[in-house]
Amino acid sequence: MPRKGQQDPFTCPVCGARVTDPERTWTLVSPIPDRQGRVTITIMGAFRCPNGHTWKAVIKKLKSGGKEEEEEQGEREQGDVITLDLSDIESVDDSAPPPE
C-alpha cells in the first residue's frame, strides 16, 4: 500500500489506482507572505478512485510577488531627468482666473 505522504496526488492512497482528473479543485491563498514578500497559492483537488475511495491532495503550489520576482525582470535603464522652472511656463489660457 502507498504511504499517506505520497508524491503523486493522482494516485489513490488506499488501493494505488490512478485517476486522471480531480472531481473538484479550489485554491488556498496564504494570508501572510514569506520573508521575501511572496504569497503562496496552493491548488487543491478532491479525488475519487474507481473503487470508491476519496481523498484530497495538493495539486500544485505557486509563489507570486515579492522581491525575487522584481529581480527576475532585470534592471531598468535610468530615464532622462527633466527639470523645469515654473516661471518658464506660460499660461495657456489667459482668461482663466489665477489659482488661489
Image (cartoon, helix red, strand yellow):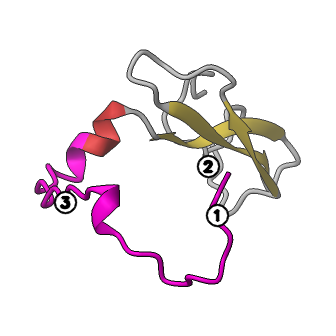
Q: Position of residue 39 (x, y in %)?
A: 54, 32
Circle 3 residue: 82
Q: Residue at x 65, y 49 (%)?
A: 17
Nearer mark to the viewer, of 2 and 3 = 3
Report the front residue among 10 and 28: 28
Circle 1 residue: 20
Specify whether residue 2 is painted magenta.
no
Q: Quadrant of residue 77?
A: bottom left
Q: Are marks 2 and 1 in contact (CB under 8 Å)?
A: yes
Q: Position of residue 43 (x, y in %)?
A: 65, 45
Of the numbered discs 1 and 3, the one sitting upstream in the chain is: 1
Q: Residue at x 19, y 59 (%)?
A: 82
Q: Amino acid at mark 1?
A: Thr
Q: Residue at x 34, y 57 (%)?
A: 86
Specify whether residue 91 is painted magenta.
yes
Give the number of the disc on residue 7.
none
Circle 2 residue: 10
Q: Are marks 2 and 3 in contact (CB under 8 Å)?
A: no
Nearer mark to the viewer, of 1 and 3 = 3
Q: Which residues are magenta?
A: 71-100
